[in-house]
Image (cartoon, grey):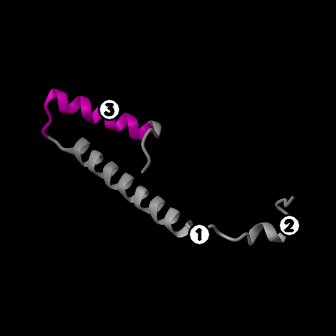
Amino acid sequence: MMDGDDPRSYSLVRGPYAHVERRRSTQRAERDRRGIDLLVQIARSSPALDDMAELRDLVRTAIAVGAVRR
């Protein structure tokens, strides 16, 4: 069993799909970021009807509580 002090624990062989997993997580983060940017842009638009004001409040709340990743 290896613990954190064992030098071998830092040189473990990566799985054959490590690059695919890394690319997927990068793409997921990019999609999340673009979605958040779009929601923020919608929330900042100045002329708002009552429904849009409520949507802006929901988006701001979701961002503030960390329900969505940036």
Residue 10, given in percent of the width and then of the height, sits at 75, 69
Q: Which region of the structure is painted magenta?
A: 47-64
Q: Residue 6, which numbered label?
A: 2
Residue 24, given in percent of the width and then of the height, sits at 45, 61
Question: Magenta stretch mostly in which secondary structure?
Answer: helix
**Is 53 inside the magenta-drawn segment?**
yes
Residue 40, given in percent of the width and then of the height, sits at 29, 46
Q: Earlier in the sequence, mark 1 or mark 2?
A: 2
Q: Earlier in the sequence, mark 3 or mark 1?
A: 1
Q: Earlier in the sequence, mark 2 or mark 3?
A: 2
- Which residue lies at the image location 39% right of the left edge and 36% below the top edge? 62
Q: Residue 58, which numbered label?
A: 3
Q: CA distance from mark 1 to mark 2?
A: 23 Å
| Residue reaching furthest to the front | 16
Q: Residues within 10 Å of mark 2 (few under 14, many from 20)?
A: few
Above or below for 2 versus 32: below
Q: Residues within 10 Å of mark 3 (few under 14, many from 20)?
A: few
Instruction: Write down the residue under mark 1.
Output: 16
Mark 2 or 3: the one toward you:
2
- Which residue lies at the image location 57% right of the left edge and 67% below the top edge? 18
Amino acid tagged 3: Leu
Amino acid tagged 2: Asp
Local secondary structure at mark 2: loop
Q: CA distance from mark 3 to mark 1?
A: 42 Å
Position of residue 41 in the picture relative to residue 31 (left or right) = left
Residue toward you, 16 or 63: 16
Local secondary structure at mark 3: helix
